[in-house]
Image (cartoon, coloured by chain):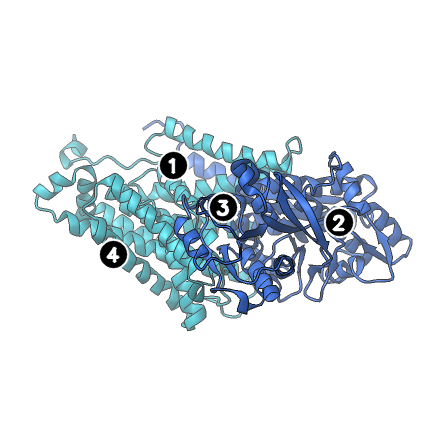
Chain colours: A blue, B cyan
Amino acid sequence: MQTLISRRRVVTGSTAAMLGTAFVPRFAYASDPINIGSLTPNTGGGAPYGGNMAAAIKRTVDQINAAGGVLNRQIKLTQEDGETNPETATRAADKLINVNQVIAILGTWASSVTLGIMPKCQSANVIQMCVSSSSDIPLRDTKGLVFNFQILNPVWGRALGQLALERGYKRFKLMALNNDFTKSILDGFVDAVGAGRLLEKPFYYNANQASYKSEVSHLLEGNPDAVFIPGYVTDFTAIYKDIYRSGYKGRVITVTFAASAPFKAAVGDAAEGILHGYPIPPLDSPAYKQYLREAGLEDNGQIQHPYGTLCRDQISVLALAIQKAGSIDVDKVKKAIVDVSTGPGKKTVYNVLDGLKAIRAGEEINYSGAGSPVEFDSHRQTVDRDVQLYEIKGGKDVVLTTRKG
Amino acid sequence: MLAYFVAMATYAGFFMILAQGLNLQWGMTGMVNFGVAGFYALGAYSGAILSTRIGIAPELAIALAGVAAGVAGLVVSLLTMRLREDYFAIVTLGFGEIVRLFALNEDWLTEGPRGLRIPARPFDFGLSNAVYSLVYLGVVALVVLVIYAICERIRSGPYGRTLRAIREDDVVAGVLGKNVLRFRVQAFVLGSVFMGVAGALFAHYIQNISPDTFMPMIAIFIWMSVIVGGYGNNKGLLLGAGIVIFILEGSRFLGDFTSIVTSQQLSSIRIILIGIILMAVLRFRPRGLIPEPKFMSEFEKTS
């Protein structure tokens, strides 16, 4: 049988192609570029954020390289798509680690992805920088390689719980989307209001349901003063419609990205009075204002690119740490990461270029970022992120207060 | 670089096992199983739970994971065998989601959305990481070969002819005195066992599984493997699964050689490319790259 692609040709061709790339000799020179990888959620559930996360990392690397690099070496950035899916992200991490020989993987967003690639990174001694909120991350990081730039959720939930108490609510019911980040938010909320004020143990709902009627009627049983529902915008919109239809008169509390613009567009005036909150970038920080200029955005007083700003901080801190460590030895770099970002009595810098100059001049620095002041605790988790609380009035978010982290 | 090829070959091995399971069910017997991800997840979770929670040897856990998936396959197939093809497909899709949602919600057993960490390493004799990954590839390759041998034996024997007859027309097969139900259940259970073993091997390889790992997308990749390779032909599937991994992962290298497009655009281009290749294969090789050999009688062969 005469065919276009014979089996032999396919086998020979693909084998030759693979082997061809395998045996290019590699020697390390001091002037070789420094390999760094990013694994942002460009597609899938994190897609609304992945684009500006990847772009923020790329922009900062370009700035560093244009100014002569780190340790007189250029940074070679390889950007992969984690697809917000741990199954494919693990293979992408395999490529970054084994082919691109990266010393660090930045920009993982979903906790499942951060945790999913962790065994590979730990065994290859690769630094991870993430914006995931799972409280399991520090527990599983036995080698001290994972740096979390996202605020840990108990702080976040606690701020919302305190607000609810101040408003005088006494009887609560809680329901959350069943994923990792909401679990730790719930813990913080319960911690603040006290378990005794819950009418019932919190329960979880699943994403992508067409209707949440039975969950909602269960939630409203006993007519609580306020309900707290951390989730994402798609499920929260469906849930809120069912709550509104039921004629519930109590207060609804959630997280800011569940009550974001698409939600308000979908429910209109019915959104009146919802309380929500979110860890915010330091809006007055020079670093945040610089970020807006770099990204070509107008300063409108609202939070823009919550994760893009954090990614700018990741690559900046990493570059500064490499300069500080004087080598790309991972064990030295991971110590230097805390050194250049955390602790009092040092010179505060707001961008990577100023920081590199200061380190070369022999100064001790503390990088303060666009997404947070970047201070790590002993588990390499970000502390000190401000949480801003809002109430929806007349279709707009009205700031109630900002709680210092 | 070598470490990367070893890892990709190992992933291709998991896909090959899954594809052979699906081929037995769909390619040879005509049962449309969209629940591949469910059986994969069931194998992964039961293997992981047996080895980490109950503490039995991981090698044994992998084998038992196959049994667990087989039992699930038996139940699913007995409950649904009288459904017509498309309805059967919907039920299997539902089964896949049931397994995923069970893993997501039954925290006490599966750690829910936090994911289950699997520290146990099967076939480990205190080896270095580089050697261990080669050993693991060897084990996966061996499993692929054993399953290939089983599938080839089935395909070339009278048993395989019966399965194909059921695929083409189950009424005719029944009229000819074949017990259609029994053959279908057997093929489905055996295919499920393969998928379960693949799942447990995968779980112990990546050492961290969460419900998000087993999205229905996996089923699509396995279907792609079988369709691209050539359904009904075991050699074709091995090639198909290899090609699917090659396309999925090889397309990542585009980013290393071009800087014209942003990484976000590149992600979309990759996925478009995968779709185009699938369409091209189906246009020019509708029965797959290595089609199933046409059955010829002894008379035709000699003439």
Q: Which residue is mark 2?
A: A282
**Which is closer to the viewer, label 4 or label 3?**
3
Above or below, A360 relative to B289 = below
Q: Amino acid at mark 1?
A: Val
Q: Is residue A76 visible?
A: yes
Q: Secondary structure at mark 3?
A: helix
Few, some or many C-alpha atoms within 10 Å of disc 3 (few <14, some 14-19, many ≥20)? many
Residue A135 in the image: x percent, y percent?
Answer: 59, 62
Circles 3, 1 touching at the beta carbon (< 8 Å) = no
The residue carrying mark 4 is: B75
Return the chain for callout 1: B
Whole-percent x and y of residue B180? 15, 47
Q: Is residue B81 above or below residue A381?
A: above
Mark 2 falls within which chain? A
Q: Where does the N terminus of chain A fall, quadrant-wise?
A: top left
Residue, disc 1: B228
Residue at point 78%, 37% (across, down): A293
Disc 4 crowd, CA 10 A, few/some/many (<14, 14-19, 20+): some
The Cα–Cα distance between marks 3 and 2, rounded to whole angstroms, is: 30 Å
Q: Earlier in the sequence, mark 3 or mark 2?
A: 3
Camera-side residue of A186 and A373: A186
The residue drawn where x is 53% and y is 50% is A231
Subunit of mark 3? A
Q: At 42% across and 46% down in the image, what residue appears?
A: A209
Quadrant where the C terminus of chain A is found in the figure: bottom right
Q: Are marks 1 and 2 on the same chain?
A: no
- Quarter of image, res B41: bottom left
